[in-house]
Image (tube, grey):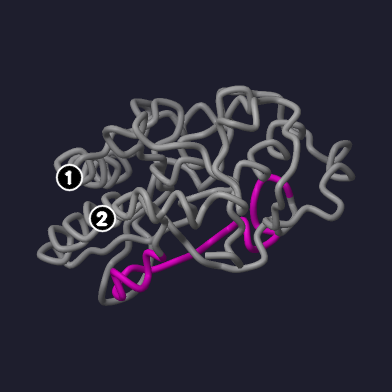
Amino acid sequence: MKLGLVLCLLTGITSTASAQSYKYIDNSKIVSIKNYADYVNNHPAKKLVEIKKMIPGIALNIRYATKNNFTGQAVYRQAKAFARLPVVKALQQVQLALKARGLALKIYDAYRPYSVTVKFYEIAKDTTFVADPAKGSRHNRGCAIDLTLIDIKTGRELDMPTGYDSFEKAAAADYPDLSPQKLKNREILRAVMEANGFKIYPSEWWHYDFNGWEQYELMDIPFEYL
C-alpha cells in the first residue's frame, strides 16, 4: 500500500482520548474515560489489565508505540499491552503450554483505544486489514491480541509467513505457499492459541480474537488512564 500521500493525516495522533462525539458510531456504544470507573465497579471481571504485570515472562514489541508500523508514526504514548482480565488469564495458559516447548509469546498489540481505530481507517480505508469504525474493532473491546512466538533461550522470533502488519497475501492465516518451517511455526502458534480460547483472524496470521468477544463493549480509554 502507498501510504506516503496520507501520512500527513497522522500529525498529532496519540492514544489520548477524552469524552467526545464520535462521528462513525453512537456515543452510547463506547466506554470512555467519563464512565470507565463506574463500568469497572459494575463489571470487575471485565476490567482492562496490563498483560506484563500478570505474565512477567511475556515479551513485548509494541509496534504502534514506535514508527515501525504501517502508519510510519508512533500512535501510542506508552509501549504497553492491556487486555480484559479473562483474556489475560487465557494467555497465561498459552504461555505455560509454550514454556514446555522452549517457546514464549511476544505481543505486538492488544487493547487499542477506539480513537486509534478511527485514525487507522481514515488512513487505509481497507477493512480487510483495519476495522470499520462504524462497528469498532475487537482490539477496541480488549479481546484481540497480535502476537508471535519467540525462542526462550535466544529471545529471537520464530520464522513466520510475513512480518507483522503486512498487507501481503502471504499474511493470510491459511496461505499455503510457504516454506515448511514457516508453516510449522504458524501452526504451533495457531494450535496453542485455539486450544486456550482464541480464534485466528483469517487475513492475519498474528491476530487472535478471544472467544466470546461479543460480550465486551467498545472502549476508548487511553493507556495513560489505565
Examine the image and state in which quarter residue 179 appears. Answer: top left
C-alpha distance separating marks 2 and 1:
8 Å
Check residue 88 for magenta coloring. Answer: no
Residue 148 lies, with reference to residue 157, above or below; the image says: above
Q: Circle 1 is placed at which residue position? A: 196
Q: Which residues are magenta?
A: 50-71
Residue at (32%, 63%) from the top-left corner?
Answer: 150
Q: Is residue 91 left or right of residue 171?
A: left
Element type at marker 1? loop
Measuring from the top left, give residue 169's x and y in whole percent.
51, 26
Q: Nearer the viewer, residue 153 or 58?
A: 58
Task: Return the x and y of residue 107 as percentages of the image width and height.
Answer: 42, 58
Which amino acid lies under the numbered mark 1 shown in the image of this protein?
Asn
Taking the spot 60% from the left edge, 47% from the top edge, the residue there is 32
Residue 206 in picture, x, y percent from top left: 41, 43
Crowd band around label 1 with a 10 angstrom C-alpha radius: few (<14), some (14–19), many (20+): some
| Viewer-proximal residue among 2 and 142 | 142
The residue lying toward the viewer, choosing from 168 and 7, is: 7
Which quadrant of the figure contains the N terminus?
top right
Identify whether 76 is placed above or below 169: below
Report the amino acid beneath label 2: Leu
Residue 44 lies, in percent from the top left, at: 32, 55
Q: Is residue 28 above or below residue 50?
A: above
Q: As rendered, which of 40 and 124 lies closer to the eye?
A: 40
Q: Are marks 2 and 1 in contact (CB under 8 Å)?
A: yes
- The local secondary structure at tag 2 comes to helix
Q: Which residue is mark 2?
A: 91
Residue 53: in magenta span = yes
Total marks shown come to 2
State the residue lying farthest toward the left: 100
